């Protein structure tokens, strides 16, 4: 953690020395990453937001902010970032990650039917994605469809007996 404190200090000094520098978004991104590693997710989100104000075209920073926002229950912000990123033809893997984050945000907003659509898409794109399968079952259970949730879990376990534990 000491090395992170030293890096944070250097990055903060750079922002003070050149507050209007064109590349400050990179410094804000790194400060966000440091804050994330240190567990200060609100600070990380703030740094990512500062970076995006300077360079809104930086998709990897927007993804990082969405992932952090959902963890601090800023569901509307996470959903908006995912919506924006999904418009840029992400790869299959990126699409799965974005849909999963958006589904988590939608569940936090209690929009389970929309969350289920995203989770079902993730399951189609990546049938072994256990997190999506479990969240889909949870979503069904939350909507009073416990039997359907159990059936989906049982199907998954039959197809993947190595996951019974």
Image: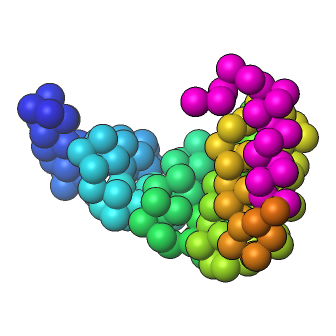
Residue 116 occupies quadrant: bottom right
- Vertical placement of residue 150 versus 159, above or below: below
Q: Is residue 19 left or right of residue 96?
A: left
Quadrant placement of the C terminus: top right
The stretch in magenta equals: 148-165
Report the residue at 67% width, 79% height from top: 110
How far across and down, in percent of the image, does residue 121 sit?
87, 49
Closer to the camera in the image, 60 or 38: 38
In the rendered image, the residue lying farthest to the top is 162
Q: Is residue 141 left or right of residue 12?
A: right
Q: Is residue 76 left or right of residue 112?
A: left
How far across and down, in percent of the image, does residue 134 sit?
68, 49
How far across and down, in percent of the image, does residue 164 sit?
65, 30
Q: Is residue 65 magenta?
A: no
* Numbered disc total: 0
**Taken as a whole, is the magenta stretch helix, strand or loop?**
helix
Q: Is residue 49 left or right of residue 165?
A: left
């Amino acid at each position: 953690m000491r090395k992170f404190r030293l890096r944070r200090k250097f990055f903060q000094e750079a922002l003070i020395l050149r507050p209007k520098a064109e590349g400050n978004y990179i410094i804000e991104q790194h400060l966000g990453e440091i804050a994330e590693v240190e567990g200060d997710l609100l600070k990380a989100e703030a740094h990512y937001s500062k970076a995006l104000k300077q360079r809104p075209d930086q998709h990897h920073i927007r993804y990082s902010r969405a992932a952090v926002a959902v963890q601090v229950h800023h569901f509307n912000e996470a959903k908006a970032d995912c919506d924006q990123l999904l418009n840029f033809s992400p790869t299959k893997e990126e699409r799965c990650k974005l849909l999963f984050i958006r589904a988590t945000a939608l569940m936090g907003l209690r929009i389970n039917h929309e969350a289920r659509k995203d989770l079902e898409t993730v399951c189609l794109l990546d049938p072994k994605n256990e997190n999506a399968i479990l969240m889909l079952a949870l979503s069904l259970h939350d909507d009073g469809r416990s039997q359907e949730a159990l059936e989906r879990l049982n199907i998954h376990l039959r197809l993947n007996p190595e996951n019974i534990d």
